Amino acid sequence: MITRLLIANRGEIACRIIRTAQALGIHTIAVYSQADSHAQHVLLADEAWFIGESAVNQSYLCSDKIIAVARAAKADAVHPGYGFLSENADFARTCIEHKIIFVGPDEYALRSMGSKSQAKTIMHQAQVPLVPGYHGAEQAPALLQAEADKIGYPVILKASAGGGGKGMRIVNIASEFSAALDAAQREAMASFADAHMLVEKYIAQPRHIEVQIFCDRHGNGVYLFDRDCSVQRRHQKIVEEAPAPGLSDTLRQKMGIAAVNAALAIDYVGAGTVEFLLDSNEQFYFMEMNTRLQVEHPVTEMITNEDLVAWQLAVANHDVLPKSQAQLTCTGHAIEVRVYAENPNDNFLPATGMLQAYQPPESNADVRVDSGVIQGDEIGIYYDPMFAKLICKGRNRQEALQRCQQALQQFFIAGVTTNLGFLQVILSHPAFVKGQVSTHFIADYYAELLPQQFAPPPQVIVALAALIQHTHNTMQQANSTIPAHWRANLPHTTLMQMHLCADADVTFSASVSCRLDLQNSQKNDRDGCKYTIVHERHSHHVELEATGQPYHYMTTINHQRTPIYACEFSCHHWAILYAGQQYSIRLVQPDLGEHSSTQDHAFVAPMNGTVVHIPITPPCHIQKGDTVMVIEAMKMEHNIVAPCSGEITEVFYQTGALVSGGVTVVNFVAEDEI
């Protein structure tokens, strides 16, 4: 019987597991790295143990440290969550050797399904349809390229030990194969310590359909219906829904039975997900089996009204499955969106920073937020940039979609660039609304899906102007030292100039400038103020009232009452959520104006990270588009490429070095300057 559970993970999934375990009366034990010393899972658990430095290979991937903590804390079970050690067969075996329950399948199942090549062999023997490809042990680059040539391009390279889009590359033509193989193997080695690759035919316009299965130690297996996870970027899911829309009952049942049979063929125990590619002819092909709880498990919980973590703990206690296949029902529809710290306008580059404001929508029976952060937490460089999930349920897909769209419009985050706006556009796109998606959805509609760079309506500008004036007045009363750029203004009147941004730190290509004349008329008796604001020769009467909720205000603009969220997340840089749309607005001091300088042909690190590859040796000549350095951050590689041809005379960093975002990494002389 599990009484003391160690959660070998962090972030939202650790919090998720802790809550269910505590509800079952189980004592919870967290582990944490240096970067996570004040993380929410540490505060939520009954006790927490330090396991090492911030880098994952010194903390969350150190099985020896985690086992040592489990023994010292007298844990009788370890829940690995997802990622990290969740699919590590050696870790599962070590737990059992120390008489600690591993909440998951046994070593054989993990090893069988953890190796994509071995999994393909087993599925072939079980007569599960497979995508044409090479899954052999021989890994000579020439042989892999020969197999790719034989299969026919395009092909996809996959890390045999991988998942989550890591160690994966699409190769469209033979000449791209070598570079793609090198990059995929590096990423696979960094993520899984295993560079073994598969080569498979790349299927055009497939859907990614997965089936949630559960098996116990008594020979029982069930499927808890299916999910569509086709909307992906960088081979990582960002929108999931259950059940998968548009499947016939016959196909749905056929896939469910095939998934359960695949699990029973390896004596599987616990939660697992069998992933299929579904083509336009309703032919499905085995892709892989994830031998753990999935990130997207909440959509299944919403439509089945089951707690899958509670199921995991029951099975780990050698109990029979809580329900049989006949007892399981699917009710309604659920959609999940993943909230990432990233910039969709900059090729989804991961972002870092402090969550100056974090106000998720209010949770209820149909709206759920799974998160591992609160306001004031830091999003750093060491871990995956996903920090929250929004899950919404409806009686049908249309209602679930509408509910999710509305909840996204109430999600306010400031201080870190996120994909919230991108998610809003996805959910409102006609193809998604119709359920007409494939794994190429984002690539096919990329230009349409990027958050549009347009100026906010006048209401946003005047509301923020009133708030800035109100903030200034409050500071002026509390502090006798008045900033110079305020002292220079006439009494009761402030002139402002603003520049508008499409998203945090992304400036409009065509900046909009405006001058605002604020005339502070009076203070009201509800902890607010009234202002007259002149914007573009139009006078607006604004009443601003604090609601008591962080960063939340009620505005009345020309007699129209609207709630807003607003936060100054850095000096003169404001985020504002108005009528469901979030804007980033930068205040420019009138006496200084705004000047920017750019250094032509600068090679700068796009964000904080580690140098993992330098394919050049200076001095050397490079062509436009050549990669000069590869930086890894948040478990993903980012190439720094030449914007034009020229000479590299010096590289300022070595492989393994830490670099800060924005620093120049090489000395470069453009060809036209030589």
Image (cartoon, grey):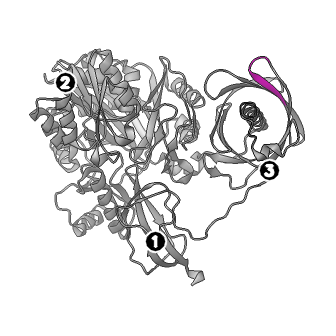
- Residue 102 in view here: no
Point 18% across, 42% down: residue: 64
| Secondary structure under the numbered disc 2 in the rendered image | helix
Q: 380 above or below 336? A: below
Looking at the rendering, which quadrant does residue 141 occupy? bottom left
Q: Are marks 2 and 1 in contact (CB under 8 Å)?
A: no
Residue type (three-letter) at the residue carrying disc 2: Ala
Magenta region: 525-531
Separation of residues labelled 3 and 1 (CA atoms): 42 Å
Dot label at residue 316: 2
Residue that carries the numbered disc 1 in the rendered image: 626
Q: Nearer the viewer, residue 655 or 116?
A: 655
Residue that carries the numbered disc 3 in the rendered image: 590
Looking at the rendering, which quadrant does residue 173 occupy? bottom left
- Residue 669 in view here: yes
Image check: 536 left or right of 155? right
Q: Residues within 10 Å of mark 2 (few under 14, many from 20)?
A: many
Residue type (three-letter) at the residue carrying disc 3: Pro
x and y percent of residue 11 in the render? 38, 34
Number of on-image labels: 3
Image check: 58 left or right of 451? left
